[in-house]
């Protein structure tokens, strides 16, 4: 049981490039989310999903796209990277019911030059 | 979701109880209080949550005031490994996948 996995761990992009951050979970969780964390700040919600085929915007969705074609995967796409998107990105998942505890991945450190 | 207010930093001596306060004066009747912590640059970790009753688990205790406008997370015997940023979050209980983080409290446990 790997929990929540994220790839890559580190990435450097040039302004204007696009890329996809991968997130997968093997706990059969319905809910999945993406957050970003800038230095010295708390996490901010980018997008989240309550199940396959259903996504919604969080606090800071601009510049990012998501889709949820399977329960296990929730990729985050940067359409045209900007230096303001330099951050650490965390993916999380949680199940319906119980504590609704969110399990977080190890994060992806993204630098946009 | 209701907003929360926490002190930016606190110190605690190793072995003593750490009491971390949180104000959530605009909390609604169907909103729970959740606590997470983030050690160094790792992903946040769930600690505990509650609606109106006090709660305890193997990690911590959560004390919620009767009017639910504030709460306190208690780490009964703090260790150096408890040094972290602690986030108090208020949200509707069944809204999984959506956590709105504030700035949190940076707890430093000192020997």
Image (cartoon, rainbow, N blue to C red):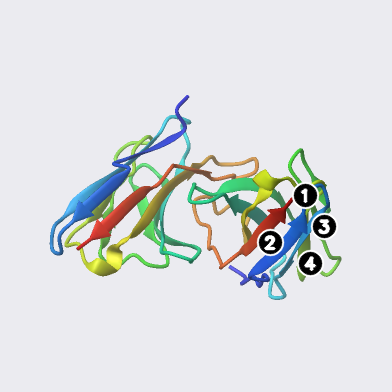
Question: What residue would you read off at disc 3?
Answer: B63
x, y percent for residue B27: 69, 70
The first of marks 1 and 3 along the sequence is: 1
Residues at marks 4 and 3, CA–CA distance in whole angstroms:
10 Å
Disc 3/disc 2 C-alpha distance (Å): 17 Å
Task: Using the rendered view, name the quadrant where residue A65 is placed.
Answer: bottom left
Residue B37 image position (x, y, % from top left): 61, 52
> Mark 3: few, some, or many residues within 10 Å (few <14, many ≥20)?
many
Q: Are marks 1 and 3 in contact (CB under 8 Å)?
A: no
Q: Secondary structure at mark 3?
A: strand
Kindly tell me whether residue A81 is visible in this rendering: yes
Q: Position of residue A63 (x, y in %)?
A: 25, 65
Query: In the rendered structure, the residue with mark 4 lies on which chain?
Result: B
Q: CA distance from mark 1 to mark 3?
A: 21 Å
Q: Residues within 10 Å of mark 2 (few under 14, many from 20)?
A: few
Mark 1 and mark 4: span between their CA atoms? 30 Å
Label 2 vs label 1: CA separation? 36 Å
* Label 4 sits on residue: B68
Residue placed at 77% from the left, 68% from the top?
Answer: B70
Q: Which residue is mark 1?
A: B14
Q: Quadrant of residue B57?
A: top right
Residue at image x 48%, y 31%? A27
Mark 2 highlights which residue?
Answer: B30
| Tag 4 secondary structure | loop
Q: Secondary structure at mark 2?
A: loop
- Residue at figure coordinates x 62%, y 52% from the top left: B36
SS for dot 1: loop
Q: Nearer the viewer, mark 3 or mark 2?
A: 3
Bin the neighbour count of mark 4 within 10 Å (Cα to Cα): few under 14, some 14-19, many 20 and up: many
């Amino acid at each position: 049981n790997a929990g929540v996995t994220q790839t890559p761990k580190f990435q450097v992009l040039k302004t204007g490039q696009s890329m996809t951050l991968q997130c997968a979970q093997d706990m059969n969780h319905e809910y999945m989310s993406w957050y970003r964390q800038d230095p010295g700040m708390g996490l901010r919600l980018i997008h989240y999903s309550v199940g396959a085929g259903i996504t919604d915007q969080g606090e800071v969705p601009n510049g990012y796209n998501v889709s949820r074609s399977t329960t296990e995967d929730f990729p985050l796409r940067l359409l045209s990277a900007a230096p303001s998107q330099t951050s650490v990105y965390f993916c999380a998942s949680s199940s319906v019911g119980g504590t609704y505890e969110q399990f977080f991945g190890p994060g992806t450190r993204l630098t946009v030059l | 979701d209701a907003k929360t207010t926490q002190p930016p930093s606190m110190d605690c001596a190793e072995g003593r109880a750490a009491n971390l306060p949180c104000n959530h004066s605009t909390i609604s009747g169907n909103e729970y209080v959740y606590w997470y912590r983030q050690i160094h640059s790792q992903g946040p970790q769930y600690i505990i949550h509650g609606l109106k009753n006090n709660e305890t688990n193997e990690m911590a205790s959560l004390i919620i005031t009767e009017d639910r406008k504030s709460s306190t997370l208690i780490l009964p015997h703090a260790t150096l490994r408890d040094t972290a940023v602690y986030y108090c979050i208020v949200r509707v209980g069944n809204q999984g996948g959506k956590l709105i983080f504030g700035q949190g409290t940076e707890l430093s446990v000192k020997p």
